[in-house]
Amino acid sequence: MQLYDVYSLYPIEPVRGEGSYVFTADGERYLDFYGGHAVISVGHAHPHYVKLISEQVARLGFYSNSVENPLQQELADKLGRLSGLDDYSLFLVSSGAEANENALKLASFRTGRRRVIAFRGGFHGRTSAAVNATDNEGIKAPINRNYPVTFLELNDLDALARELKKGDVAAVIIEGIQGIGGIHIPEKDYLEALPGLCHANGTLLILDEVQSGYGRSGKFFAFQHCDVRPDIVTVAKGMGNGFPIGGVLIAPEIPAQKGQLGTTFGGSHLACAAGIAVLDIMENEDLIGNADRQGEYLRHALEETGLFTNVRGQGLMIGLDMDEPIGELRKRLLFEHRVFTGSAKDPNTIRLLPPLNVTREACEVVIDAFQEALVAGGQSGKNH
Ligand code: PMP
């Protein structure tokens, strides 16, 4: 059987990882400033993570959600304590798209409405409801256009107020920081106005923290840089450090009703072990603090180079703009400097999403790599 050919691949085959690095079979070392697309939170092959997962799979990897599994409550307790959302409830799933799918479904159950407001540049996953709320026509099949979505510009409060007043909106879904859209942070005043505006019109507020959550922004959730209380928060990516696990965090105002939601794999014993290990490490090693400190240093140092037209972000979620496409630069960084970086919707934007335990030394290597790669390519992000 052939693989269904949907991905463009770099000719690199990592076989082993350690911290912020991955290694090929011939021992070549690559610095992972893409974090496997914001998935690697506590670093590759962290010993505590390896230990908890290996011990759990040797005991019991999976049964089903028809029996008691206290690991789910242990995970929920830790998540509540570390995130500060301890009065929310947790529904465990296996991916970011599945988390958003369930969040949208809950909002529609709760309000009895169908319309959703999402944002230009937003990304919420590739499953049916999640992709319909994603601003990318090319990845929607006709079957995905199954409810009306209105895409608004980020930070345009008047437009949002006008749409919500129509009284038919089930949910507003917004990323804490837009990831694939190119690292765009909603304005504080805007984000803080959302709950009041939504609730006045019978609409629920869903914060998609799949990419920006789990410490990446230097707070547990990116929206916690502001004073906001969402109705639903979705998480995945960094939650499992590579193990497929996601979660829907649901405010107490939305009581559970048996039978509305469900999944086979979500919350398995093995998934919970991965999720618990990640939170243990985040807490014991102060990874949120590290994300804040290294992010601050990186953004400042990258800005100092004068190589980019814009440097923005929070914590270890960083966007760099140039005034030309970044494809060649990313290739040079990868093949000549052995640094993985990420792209964004805008072809002129690079995304940096390293593991949350990235060291200062690794940040310095990357800053030098950018400088050398840009000089060697005769490139500068600024008009020259
Ligand atoms: N929401 C956001 C903000 C994302 O960045 C992504 C993945 N890039 C998703 C949802 C979908 O997550 P998954 O690929 O795990 O389904």
Image (cartoon, grey):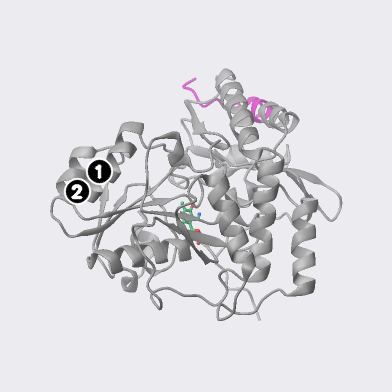
Identify the element where label 1 is drawn.
helix
Residue closest to the eye, 94 or 150 = 94
Specify the amino acid type for callout 1.
Answer: Gly
User: Is any part of residue 8 visible from this angle?
Assistant: no
Q: Residue at x 59, y 42 (%)?
A: 353
In the rendered image, the vertical position of residue 315 relative to residue 40, given as above or below? above
**Residue labelled with disc 1:** 196
Q: CA distance from mark 1 to mark 2?
A: 6 Å
Q: Residues within 10 Å of mark 1 (few under 14, many from 20)?
A: few
- Determine which quarter of the picture holds residue 302: top right
- Determine which quarter of the picture holds residue 130: bottom left
Q: Position of residue 339 (x, y in %)?
A: 69, 40
Highlighted range, magenta: 370-384
Q: Identify the disc placed on residue 45.
A: none
Q: Position of residue 226 (x, y in %)?
A: 40, 35
User: Is any part of residue 251 visible from this angle?
Assistant: yes
**Residue labelled with disc 2:** 200
Q: Residue at x 72, y 29 (%)?
A: 360
Q: Given contact means CB atoms under 8 Å apart, are the residues at marks 1 and 2 in contact?
A: yes
